Amino acid sequence: MKKELTSIKQKRLNSILDEATKLLIEKPNASMHEIAESAGIGVATLHRYVESREQLMIYLGLRAIEVVSETMKNIRLDEENCESYIPELIEALIPLGDKIYFLAHDATVNYNREIEGADRKLREPVLRAIGLLQQKGYFHRNVDKNWIVNVLYSLLFLTWQQVIEGHIARKSAAALVVDTFYHGFKAKD
Protein backbone atom coordinates (compact mmCIF):
# COMPACT_ATOMS: atom_id res chain seq x y z
CA MET A 1 0.00 0.00 0.00
CA LYS A 2 2.85 2.42 0.77
CA LYS A 3 4.37 4.09 -2.24
CA GLU A 4 8.05 3.36 -2.86
CA LEU A 5 10.29 6.09 -1.48
CA THR A 6 14.02 6.70 -1.44
CA SER A 7 15.67 5.77 1.84
CA ILE A 8 16.02 9.45 2.82
CA LYS A 9 12.35 10.14 2.10
CA GLN A 10 11.34 6.94 3.91
CA LYS A 11 13.32 8.01 7.00
CA ARG A 12 11.61 11.42 6.85
CA LEU A 13 8.19 9.80 6.48
CA ASN A 14 8.93 7.49 9.42
CA SER A 15 9.90 10.51 11.51
CA ILE A 16 6.66 12.26 10.55
CA LEU A 17 4.65 9.12 11.37
CA ASP A 18 6.35 8.71 14.74
CA GLU A 19 5.56 12.33 15.68
CA ALA A 20 1.98 11.94 14.42
CA THR A 21 1.53 8.83 16.58
CA LYS A 22 2.63 10.70 19.69
CA LEU A 23 0.31 13.63 18.96
CA LEU A 24 -2.70 11.48 18.09
CA ILE A 25 -2.44 9.59 21.37
CA GLU A 26 -2.71 12.88 23.24
CA LYS A 27 -5.17 14.48 20.84
CA PRO A 28 -7.01 11.89 18.68
CA ASN A 29 -8.83 14.54 16.64
CA ALA A 30 -5.73 16.57 15.79
CA SER A 31 -5.96 18.26 12.40
CA MET A 32 -3.52 17.69 9.57
CA HIS A 33 -2.17 21.18 10.29
CA GLU A 34 -1.53 20.23 13.95
CA ILE A 35 0.10 16.98 12.86
CA ALA A 36 2.38 18.83 10.46
CA GLU A 37 3.24 21.37 13.14
CA SER A 38 4.04 18.60 15.64
CA ALA A 39 6.36 17.01 13.06
CA GLY A 40 8.07 20.34 12.46
CA ILE A 41 6.96 20.66 8.86
CA GLY A 42 4.38 22.60 6.88
CA VAL A 43 1.06 21.09 5.95
CA ALA A 44 2.06 21.19 2.24
CA THR A 45 5.08 19.03 3.04
CA LEU A 46 2.88 16.63 4.99
CA HIS A 47 0.62 16.31 1.94
CA ARG A 48 3.64 15.42 -0.21
CA TYR A 49 3.93 12.30 1.92
CA VAL A 50 0.27 11.53 2.54
CA GLU A 51 -2.71 12.54 0.46
CA SER A 52 -5.34 12.46 3.21
CA ARG A 53 -5.94 11.83 6.88
CA GLU A 54 -7.26 8.36 6.00
CA GLN A 55 -4.03 7.52 4.20
CA LEU A 56 -2.03 8.94 7.13
CA MET A 57 -3.87 6.65 9.54
CA ILE A 58 -3.14 3.63 7.36
CA TYR A 59 0.53 4.59 7.18
CA LEU A 60 0.54 5.00 10.96
CA GLY A 61 -0.82 1.48 11.39
CA LEU A 62 1.72 0.03 8.98
CA ARG A 63 4.53 1.93 10.70
CA ALA A 64 3.44 0.66 14.12
CA ILE A 65 3.40 -2.92 12.85
CA GLU A 66 6.80 -2.45 11.20
CA VAL A 67 8.43 -1.14 14.39
CA VAL A 68 6.82 -3.69 16.71
CA SER A 69 7.52 -6.56 14.31
CA GLU A 70 11.18 -5.58 13.96
CA THR A 71 11.51 -5.58 17.74
CA MET A 72 9.71 -8.88 18.17
CA LYS A 73 11.99 -10.63 15.65
CA ASN A 74 14.70 -10.57 18.30
CA ILE A 75 12.58 -12.48 20.83
CA ARG A 76 12.50 -16.21 20.29
CA LEU A 77 9.70 -18.37 21.63
CA ASP A 78 11.21 -21.50 23.12
CA GLU A 79 8.22 -23.76 23.71
CA GLU A 80 10.05 -25.73 26.40
CA ASN A 81 10.90 -22.55 28.30
CA CYS A 82 7.98 -20.36 27.25
CA GLU A 83 7.98 -18.63 30.65
CA SER A 84 10.86 -16.40 29.52
CA TYR A 85 9.07 -15.16 26.38
CA ILE A 86 6.57 -12.78 28.02
CA PRO A 87 9.12 -10.99 30.26
CA GLU A 88 11.47 -10.53 27.28
CA LEU A 89 8.57 -9.30 25.17
CA ILE A 90 7.48 -6.83 27.85
CA GLU A 91 11.02 -5.48 28.27
CA ALA A 92 11.34 -4.95 24.51
CA LEU A 93 7.89 -3.47 23.90
CA ILE A 94 7.50 -0.97 26.75
CA PRO A 95 9.42 1.70 24.80
CA LEU A 96 6.98 1.12 21.92
CA GLY A 97 3.86 1.78 24.01
CA ASP A 98 2.65 4.47 21.62
CA LYS A 99 2.78 2.03 18.69
CA ILE A 100 1.06 -0.69 20.72
CA TYR A 101 -1.68 1.75 21.74
CA PHE A 102 -2.22 2.82 18.16
CA LEU A 103 -2.56 -0.78 16.97
CA ALA A 104 -4.94 -1.71 19.76
CA HIS A 105 -7.16 1.39 19.73
CA ASP A 106 -7.32 3.15 16.38
CA ALA A 107 -10.53 2.33 14.49
CA THR A 108 -8.91 2.91 11.07
CA VAL A 109 -6.44 0.12 11.79
CA ASN A 110 -9.27 -2.30 12.51
CA TYR A 111 -10.90 -1.81 9.10
CA ASN A 112 -7.90 -2.13 6.82
CA ARG A 113 -7.29 -5.66 5.52
CA GLU A 114 -3.55 -5.19 5.05
CA ILE A 115 -3.13 -3.92 8.60
CA GLU A 116 -5.48 -6.54 10.07
CA GLY A 117 -3.51 -9.32 8.37
CA ALA A 118 -0.16 -7.94 9.49
CA ASP A 119 -1.46 -7.46 13.04
CA ARG A 120 -2.76 -11.05 13.15
CA LYS A 121 0.65 -12.27 12.03
CA LEU A 122 2.33 -10.05 14.62
CA ARG A 123 0.17 -11.51 17.40
CA GLU A 124 0.74 -15.18 16.44
CA PRO A 125 3.81 -15.84 18.62
CA VAL A 126 2.26 -13.97 21.54
CA LEU A 127 -0.95 -15.98 21.25
CA ARG A 128 1.12 -19.16 20.98
CA ALA A 129 3.05 -18.25 24.13
CA ILE A 130 -0.18 -17.45 25.99
CA GLY A 131 -1.62 -20.82 24.94
CA LEU A 132 1.49 -22.61 26.22
CA LEU A 133 1.34 -20.67 29.47
CA GLN A 134 -2.33 -21.59 29.83
CA GLN A 135 -1.40 -25.26 29.41
CA LYS A 136 1.24 -24.88 32.13
CA GLY A 137 -1.27 -23.29 34.50
CA TYR A 138 0.02 -19.71 34.48
CA PHE A 139 -3.30 -18.42 33.14
CA HIS A 140 -6.83 -19.80 33.28
CA ARG A 141 -7.46 -22.07 30.32
CA ASN A 142 -10.99 -20.80 29.82
CA VAL A 143 -9.91 -17.17 29.27
CA ASP A 144 -9.69 -16.20 25.60
CA LYS A 145 -6.08 -15.76 24.47
CA ASN A 146 -6.97 -12.61 22.52
CA TRP A 147 -8.34 -11.05 25.71
CA ILE A 148 -5.09 -11.82 27.51
CA VAL A 149 -3.04 -10.28 24.69
CA ASN A 150 -5.24 -7.17 24.69
CA VAL A 151 -4.74 -6.83 28.45
CA LEU A 152 -0.99 -7.15 27.88
CA TYR A 153 -1.11 -4.46 25.16
CA SER A 154 -3.03 -2.17 27.51
CA LEU A 155 -0.50 -2.72 30.31
CA LEU A 156 2.35 -1.97 27.90
CA PHE A 157 0.78 1.30 26.83
CA LEU A 158 -0.09 2.40 30.36
CA THR A 159 3.41 1.60 31.55
CA TRP A 160 4.97 3.50 28.63
CA GLN A 161 2.74 6.45 29.47
CA GLN A 162 3.66 6.34 33.17
CA VAL A 163 7.38 6.14 32.34
CA ILE A 164 7.09 9.13 29.98
CA GLU A 165 5.26 11.11 32.68
CA GLY A 166 7.90 10.18 35.28
CA HIS A 167 5.61 8.15 37.55
CA ILE A 168 7.44 4.85 37.02
CA ALA A 169 11.20 4.43 36.78
CA ARG A 170 12.27 3.12 33.38
CA LYS A 171 14.47 0.44 34.98
CA SER A 172 11.68 -1.01 37.11
CA ALA A 173 8.90 -0.77 34.50
CA ALA A 174 9.30 -4.23 32.95
CA ALA A 175 9.35 -6.01 36.32
CA LEU A 176 6.23 -4.11 37.37
CA VAL A 177 4.39 -5.11 34.19
CA VAL A 178 5.45 -8.76 34.46
CA ASP A 179 4.33 -8.92 38.08
CA THR A 180 1.02 -7.18 37.32
CA PHE A 181 0.40 -9.31 34.23
CA TYR A 182 0.94 -12.58 36.09
CA HIS A 183 -0.39 -11.67 39.54
CA GLY A 184 -2.60 -8.60 39.24
CA PHE A 185 -2.67 -6.54 42.39
CA LYS A 186 -2.99 -9.43 44.77
CA ALA A 187 -0.89 -9.07 47.93
CA LYS A 188 1.83 -11.66 48.16
CA ASP A 189 1.10 -14.45 50.64
Image (cartoon, rainbow, N blue to C red):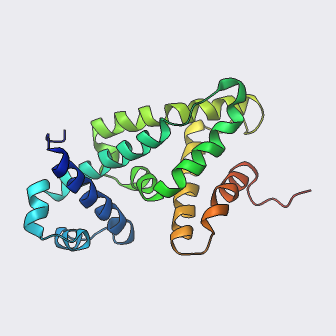
User: At 14% from the left edge and 41% from the top edge, which residue is drawn?
Assistant: 3
Q: Is residue 29 above or below residue 104?
A: below
The quarter of the picture where residue 37 lies is bottom left
Q: Which one is in front, 186 or 60? A: 60
Q: Residue sitting at 53 percent across and 31 percent down?
A: 125
Left of 107 or right of it: where is 75?
right
Residue 128: percent from left, percent from top? 58, 29
In the image as oriented, which residue stretches furthest toward the right?
Answer: 189
- Asked if residue 97 shows in the view, the reply is yes
Residue at image location 55% in from the left, 36% down from the top: 75
**In the rendered image, which quarter contains the N terminus?**
top left
Task: State left or right for residue 123 relative to residue 109.
Answer: right
- Residue 167, compared with residue 177, is above or below; it is below
Using residue 162 as the reference point, say whether residue 17 is left or right of it. left
Q: Is residue 50 visible?
A: no
Q: Percent x, y for residue 55? A: 18, 51
Q: Which residue is drawn at the image coordinates 46% and 54% (left, top)?
A: 96
- In the drawing, does residue 102 fall left or right of residue 31? right
Q: Which quadrant of the structure image shows residue 42?
A: bottom left
Quadrant that contains the C terminus: bottom right
Furthest-front residue in this view = 8
Residue 85 % position (x, y): 63, 37
